[in-house]
Image: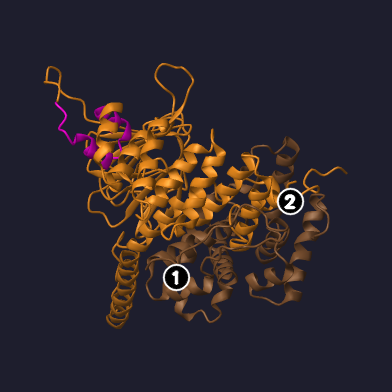
Amino acid sequence: MTPAPMTHADPKPRGGVLRVLSEGPSDEELIARAVADDAWACETLYRRHVGGAMRTALRLLRNRAEAEDVVQDAFMLAFSRLDQLRERAAFVGWLRRIVVSSVHRRLRRRRIEPLDGLEAEASSDASPMVRAELRLLDEVLDQIRERDRVAWILRCVLGYKLEEVADACDCSLATAKRRVQTAQAIVTRHVSMGDPR
Amino acid sequence: MNDPILDAPIEEHLRAAMPAGEADRMWRSFKLREQAAPARRAARRRRAAVWGAGAVVLAAAAAFGLVVLVPHGEAGPVALAEGHALPATLGSQADPSVYDLDDGSRIVLAPRTDAQVVANDEVAVRARLDRGSATFDVRPGGPRRWIIDAGDARVEVLGTRFSVTRRGAAVEVRVERGLVEVHHPSLDRPAQLTAGQSVTVGEVDPPDGSGEREPAAIVEEPTEAEGSPEPVAAPDAWRTRVERGDFVGAYRLLGTLGLRERARSAGPEDLMTLADIARRAGHPSEAMPIYARVVERSPGDVRAPVAAFSRGRLQLAGAPAMAAESFAFVRAHPAGAALFEEATALEAGARSRAGQGAGARLVAAEYLARFPEGRHAESMLRLTEAR
C-alpha cells in the first residue's frame, strides 16, 4: 500500500506561529494497516518505536546483546498480537510493558550472559569521575531486589514519570513509588545520587 | 559532596542506546528472526512432543518397572562433547582453546581471544567475538543456526567451517568450507561467501600505513594458481561483484569512465547501483551526480527519495543548505515514508549548519511533534531551544 503523501514544513516562520504541516500516520492508523498485513506499516511502526524500546531494555539489562534480543522478541510478540490491542493509540505503553515483562523473565533466568554494566555504556566524553560513579552504581544496583531495581532504573535513569513506571511494571502507583524509594534508599547509602526526581 | 552525576540525569552520561544506522540493522535482523520463527516454533513443538512422548514412555516404564533413558542431545542447548555445559566465556588463554561440542561442531580460539556465548538453545547458538580470532567448524545439517557477532558485523551460518578475526573495528571473515552470510552496516545487502572467499568489513587500515582509514567491504577471491592466465572480466562482471557486496572490486572493473558511460543510459535501478558502487568504493563525488540524475530524471520513481537521501548525506559535509533541500524532497515524496524520521532530523541539522536557524527550529519542532520518543528527540529539542 502506498503511504499517504506528506508535506514538509515550510522552513520560513510565519508570524511566529509554529505550524506543523506534516502529519504522518498515527500509531493507530499504522496498527490498523499492519493488522491488514501492510508490511510498510509494520516497518514504520518498528522504526518509530525501536529506539525507545532499545533504550528501556538496555538500561534495565545493562547488556546490549541481551537488550537487542528482548527488543526483537517484544516486537515479535507485539506484532503477533496487534489485533488484540484495544487502545491502539496506547501502543507505546503496551510495548513498554512487554519489554519490561520480558526483561523480568530474562533477569530471572540470567545465567550465562555477562553484565556489561552502566560503566560500559558511558558516553565517550564522560569524565573519569562519572565513570567511577557509574561503576559504583553498577555494584549497588546488583544488591537491589529485581523489582525495586527495575522501577528505580525506569524512574531515575530513564526518567519516566511514576505513572509510567507503574504502568510499565503493571503495578499500582503506590507500589511503584514504594519500589523506587526502597531502591533509592540503598543507592543513597552507597552513592550520593540525591532523591528520585 | 560534588557529585558529577547529580548535575544531570544519568541517561545523559550514557551512550545513545541506538546509534545512527542501527535501526536499519535491527530491522533486517528482525525480518530474519521473523523468517526463522516457524522453525523455532517447530523446534518447540518437537521438544513438546519429546516431552509428551517421554511422559507416556515413563508412565509405561513405571507400570512395567523399567528405566527409560532420554536420548542425549535431542533438544536444548549445545554442550561440550564430554557432557559439561558450554561456558559463557570462551578463550582468553595464552594457548589456543579448543571446544568440541556434542553436536559434532568445534570452536577453536587463537591465543588471547575473547568471546562470549550470549545465547544457546535448541535452535540457535549466538556468540560475540570481542577480540582476536576464532574458527568455527559447524556440523553441516545440524539443528541450530549459528550467529557470530563481531563489532558491527554479523555472520550467519548453517553448517560450514569459517574463521572470524577482529582487529578493533575491522572484522575479517574467511570461509574454508560451505556458505556463510555476512551482515554489516557498510553492506547494502548481506555478502554471501563460499569456500576460499573472505570479506573484511569495518574500518580498515590501508596497507601503505598512511593512517587514513576508510570504511571497507573487501571480498577476496580464492588465490589463483601460479602461472594461470589473468582472468578477463566479462562486460557485466561488475554486477557479480556488487551481488557479493564487493563494491571496491566493482568500481575497479568499471573505472570512472565506465561508471559515467553506463550512467548515461541507465534506468533508475542501475543508476542507484552505480551510485552505490562509487560511494561505497570511497568516491562520493562521483556518486553525487548519479544520485542527482535519479532524482531529476525520475522524480516520481520509488527510488527517487532513496537517491535524494543518499545525496543529502553526501552533501552534509560541504553543502548543508543543499543537503537540507535533498532531505526536504525525501520528506515530501509519497514513497519517502520509511525515511521520513531520519530525513526530518537530518534536514533540521542541515538547516542549522547552514545558518537557517528559524527553519531548523521549525523542522526540529515538527520532528518532536511527530516522534516525541524518537531517537533524535533530544538533539531536536536542543535545536528548538537554540537561539
User: Residue shown at 27%/39% (left/top)?
Assistant: B242
In percent of width and height, residue B58 lies at 32, 77
Residue toward you, B351 or B376: B351
**Magenta-drawn stretch contains B242:** yes
In percent of width and height, residue B373 lies at 61, 60
Question: Is disc 2 placed on a helix, strand or loop?
Answer: helix
Q: Residue furthest front?
A: A15
Magenta: main secondary structure equals: helix
User: Residue shown at 30%/67% (left/top)?
Assistant: B69
In percent of width and height, residue B288 lies at 41, 36
Residue A79's mark? 1
One can see residue B379 in this view: no
Could you tell me which chain the residue with mark 2 belongs to?
B
Quarter of the view holding residue B292 = top left
Which chain does brown denote in the image? A
Q: Specify few, some or many for label 1: CA neighbours under 10 Å numbering under 14, 14-19, or 20 or more.
A: some
Please give left or right for residue B156 compared with residue A197 in the image: left
One can see residue B216 in this view: yes
**Magenta-drawn stretch contains B226:** no
Residue toward you, B115 or A64: A64
In percent of width and height, residue B214 lies at 44, 29
Specify the amino acid type for callout 1.
Phe
Which chain does orange denote in the image? B
Question: Is disc 1 placed on a helix, strand or loop?
Answer: helix
Could you tell me which chain the residue with mark 1 belongs to?
A
- Could you tell me how far apart the alpha carbons at marks 1 and 2 are, in whole angstroms? 36 Å
Residue B385's mark? 2
Specify the amino acid type for callout 2.
Glu
**In the image, which residues are magenta?**
B232-254
Indicate whether B366 appears above or below B146.
below
Residue B98's mark? none
Q: How many marks?
A: 2
